[in-house]
Amino acid sequence: MKKYASILAVLVLLLGFAALSYAAPAEIPADTTAVIAKGKTQITLGGELRFRGFYGSNLRVVDESKYPVNLDTPAPNKYVYKNTANYDYRVRLNLEAKVTPNTTGYIELESGTTTADNVTWGSASGGARGVYNVGNTKESSVTIRQAWIQYQGTGLLGVPAGIKVGRQLIKLGYGLFFDHTYFGDDAILLFVQPMKELTLAVHTIKFAENSNTLNDDATAYGILAAYAGKGFGLSADITYVDHQNAGLFGAGSDIHLWNFGLRGNVDDIAGTGLNFKADVEFQTGKIRDLSPEIKLSGWAAMAGLDYKFKTMPLSLTLEYAIGSGDKGSTSDKNEAFITALGQEQHYTFVYEYFTPSACESLIDPLKSNPNRTGLCNTQYVKFGGAYDITKDLKAELYGYWLRAHRSVAINGYSERDKDLGWEVDAKVTYQIDKGLTYFVEGGYFWPGDAYKLDNGKDPDDAWAVRHGIQLRF
């Protein structure tokens, strides 16, 4: 069998720099083996197996060893224990068909459900028989994570251009506003490269098609431009989200949201090993069919420095990011930065990934999914680094200072302070064999006065740890 390099999922669009505003990262190792199909078509198979164990404590950030079951009304009458533990797994299988140098198809299948990729061990029931009729079940279905066709050529316009159609992973810039690389969306992307350094693109993304006969769709439209200079990059995009009869902020309401993003990066400044990146996002628009209508005016910003030592395998990171929150003083205006993100971790391992965030009362009044809200009403300072202990053993350690942009009610209590607290996250990764990795990651969160309980007491600290083994092939 002859070795082939795996094809990048969006070859023309990426153009060799990571700051590009629209990305669908392939997850096939670079040295996979191609399967020879009929004719000159190259079929590349790949996949991933991941098994993880998790333990978390006080992830609702409350008091004692219990927290309320009824999260809408935090009263001391219904409780469960605060600790949580489980094992899960994920299976991915992908196939890439390089039919011609210009035409590529890609399919990725994944275990799980429509809302989660990780399948909890022992989560299914009803399959066993006998006296002890527990276990012996099928725990997962197979879903389509990606399925797209891409064509690129120079015949029509005389310059490199192409189209990508289907279910694909989508991320705008650094993902402050939009990051749907967890599952992906159905989309059409048209791109052109009028000069070597410049890429222009337009896209449409379908979020929801509730009825073919009613005006109740959720669709995004956008344009983007990216310039890759020598040692630097610039990108910008405009995204319009049109959601008819959304019901997210009131029955029958329509969302008309505009997001404007500007980004830049400079690599290895003056040969020092210092890298800089920045991202600013501005939002405007309205939520209609409400009384009164709500004007949207969120914003976010991020700036970061990375320094890689030339004399040792150590890199340091200093980063600041902020997303606006809503004052809550007017009913016809919402100044919170609206985010559209997947269920994965976006910065901190505990605060943003597991605990109720400072955006809770805006996006989820019922508090059933108060986390993974990104920079909405949150700012942080991040400092830490990554070190290669050996060729196969790597370690990361980062500290976060967290603060809300506007004070907010968390866990259903009355409005508190802006102080969200501090967090320390760490991760150790060991390369056991080719494609086989073992990792341990975790975080410890010291909640601030924003989480103070109604009785005046401070909540307990929250922490979580997870380990796993992963094989990519």
Image (tube, rainbow, N blue to C red):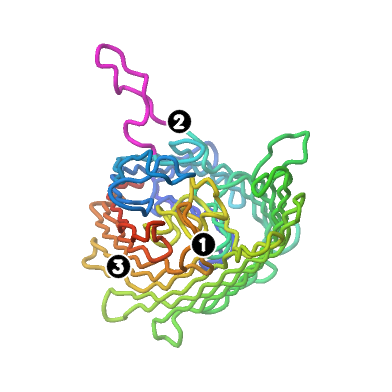
Q: Which residues are magenta?
A: 119-140
Task: Pick whichever, 388 or 298, lies toward us.
Answer: 298
Q: Residues within 10 Å of mark 2 (few under 14, many from 20)?
A: few
Task: Pick whichever, 382 or 336, lies toward us.
Answer: 336
Task: Pick whichever, 435 or 398, lies toward us.
Answer: 398
418, above or below 467, in the image: below
> How far apart are labels 2 and 1 at the CA level?
39 Å
Task: Pick whichever, 268 or 381, lies toward us.
Answer: 381
- Residue 433 location (% of width, % of height): 24, 51
Residue lying at the far left in this picture: please name it.
390
What residue is disc 1 on? 408
Q: Residues within 10 Å of mark 3 (few under 14, many from 20)?
A: some
* Residue 70 shows up from this direction: yes
Q: Of the residues under marks 2 and 1, which one precedes in the sequence?
A: 2
Q: Residue at x 37, y 44 (%)?
A: 76
- Residue 86 location (% of width, % of height): 30, 40
Residue lying at the far bottom in this picture: please name it.
270
Q: Residue at x 25, y 16 (%)?
A: 132
Residue 131 lies in magenta, yes or no? yes
What residue is disc 3 on? 397
